[in-house]
Image: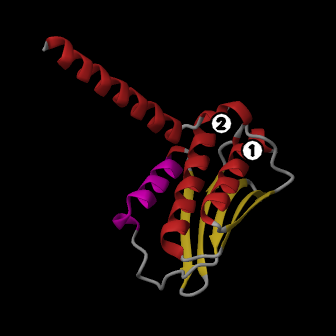
Amino acid sequence: KVAEVMGRLRGQLDRTISSVRQIARQVHPDLLDRVGLVPALAVLIDDVEERTGLAAFFVCDPRVKEIDGDILLNAALYRIVQEALTNVVRHAGATSVEVHLRVEHDELVLEVEDNGKGFEEGEYDANGSLGLKGMQERVETIDGSLSIAGRKGKGTTVTVKTKKGLRAAC
């Protein structure tokens, strides 16, 4: 009887460890460490296109060089794009999405723009969405700003700006 219980507990422990590893990969994908932010974003965007049929494009300013050595910045930007794309797929009713990473003036700018249904002023409530709260928290960790703008029937644009990482990016 004890051996049977121990076997079940061992199985539960194995499943729990597997789940924790999967969550850890989602929070900080190994791909970021292996190839860097720009290639990891390209893979993420290609994956969304393959899985959903959504036309997804990644436009990276040639002035942006790989942001090396800033694990926090890379992870935050990757997860913000991941959450924004999840929102596009789930809620926007879009047929296409573009992700832009560029240098603008003295800031690194990340933009996710879709052609979906958008929203009217007052419809958007960041407090009502865990995903949007998560994006805001990630932006705060990189001393950045987050804006979400939409127009009914014209799509939504999520914009992140930060000065962090610019020394390495340009």
Identified by mark 2, the residue type is Leu
Q: Is residue 66 left or right of residue 32?
A: right
Any part of residue 68 in sight: no
Q: What is the three-letter code of the residue carrying label 1?
A: Pro
- Asked if residue 130 is among those painted magenta in the image, a careful observer would answer yes
Q: Which mark is residue 132?
A: none
**Residue 35 makes an appearance in the image:** yes
Disc 1: which residue: 39
Q: Is residue 29 left or right of residue 34?
A: left
Residue shown at 18%/19% (left/top)? Answer: 5
- Up-down relation of residue 57 to residue 121 (above or below): above
| Residue 127 horizontal/vertical position (percent) | 35, 65
Dots 2 and 1: beta carbons under 8 Å? yes
Q: How is the image coloured?
A: secondary structure
Q: Where residue 96 appears, x then y in whole percent? A: 67, 72
In this picture, which residue range is highlighted in magenta? 126-140
Which of these two is toward me, 54 or 10? 10
Q: Residue furthest top?
A: 3
| Residue 105 occupies quadrant | bottom right
Residue drawn 26% across and 18% down? 7
Residue marked by disc 2? 31
Rendered view: 61 above or below 37? below
Task: Answer few, some or many: residues within 10 Å of disc 1's Cα (few below 14, many 20 plus, some between 14 and 19).
Answer: some
x then y, percent, for residue 158: 58, 66
Res 103 quadrant in image:
bottom right
Give the position of the C terminus as an image quadrant.
top right
Q: Nearer the viewer, residue 133 or 85?
A: 85
Q: Which circle's residue, 2 or 1, is located before the other in the chain? A: 2
Q: Secondary structure at mark 2?
A: helix
C-alpha separation, residue under disc 2 versus residue under disc 1? 9 Å
